[in-house]
Amino acid sequence: IELYLDTADVEEVKRFDSCLPLKGVTTNPSILAKSKQGLNETLKGMSETFSTTPRFHAQVVSTDVQGMVEEARQLNEMPYDMVIKVPATEVGLAAIKLMKKEGIQVLATAIYSAQQGFLAALCGADYLAPYVNRINAMNGNGVEVVADLQLLLDQNQLPAKILAASFKNTQQAMEVMKLGIEAITLPVDVAAQMFAHPAVQPAVDQFDQDWKGAFGDKLSFE
Ligand code: E4P
């Protein structure tokens, strides 16, 4: 599975890149707007801090086909491994078809149903981002949407990878990972929860206390 962090925070990228095998970072216009830091500065900072060559998924903001394609070309010229995020709307699907003719890597985003994701895959999208928590929040079933989409991809032998997005907790993330999806992006708080079981630190503290009580600070090999 490809593991991404969904953020524009360079310090958090540094933190998680050091303890997890991060493939790269996903952002969207809302995340960047909140961080108040431009795309250029954000990607530069992240690429400098990464221990490997990261893959960045960055989104177009134009709302017409030509504008999206032009932005995709510009993003694609940045000196990084870029995947261009395009909302899987009617306009976005038209733009995806044109981008794929130019060999640009595309992620179809804002996917709320399996059929919507399937159409994006038929248009040539390389990645598909179903919004699991947002679907659940609308009384839908995000995990079911992901499962149906994976089934359609498999049946039609389409190479698109599901990059599951929008998570509120680790349970949602675990449920979609169990489906065998190929990529996932986690917000910082959910990524931290993945290894933060409440019993872990007390267990480690007990080892520490027992060892130090008997032998002192360091490992003894005698
Ligand atoms: C990533 O591609 C999406 O933009 C993001 O995961 C949406 O997450 P949210 O529903 O928490 O805003």
Image (cartoon, rainbow, N blue to C red):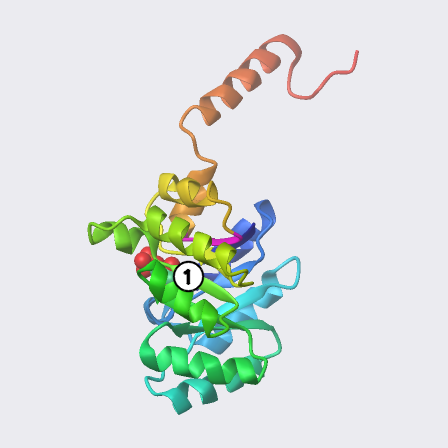
**Quick one: which residue is furthest to the top in this view?**
214
Picture residue at 64% right of the left edge, 20% below the top: 217
Foreground of the two, 73 or 194: 73
Q: Residues within 10 Å of mark 1 (few under 14, many from 20)?
A: many
Residue 110 location (% of width, % of height): 34, 66
Foreground of the two, 48 or 178: 178
In the image: residue 121, left or right of residue 110: right
Residue 96 location (% of width, % of height): 45, 79
On screen, residue 137 above or below 118: above
Location of residue 82 by image quarter: bottom right
Q: Which residues are magenta?
A: 182-187
Q: What residue sits right under mark 1 in the picture?
A: 129
The amino acid at mark 1 is Ala
In the image: residue 137, left or right of residue 6: left
Picture residue at 43% right of the left edge, 23% below the top: 199
**Quick one: which residue is furthest to the left in this view?**
139
Q: Is residue 61 visible?
A: no
- Predominant secondary structure, magenta span: strand
**Quick one: which residue is furthest to the right in this view?**
222
Residue 61 location (% of width, % of height): 36, 80
Picture residue at 44% right of the left edge, 43% below the top: 192
Location of residue 174 by image quarter: top left
Magenta span contains residue 184: yes
On screen, residue 203 above or below 96: above
Residue 103 location (% of width, % of height): 59, 80
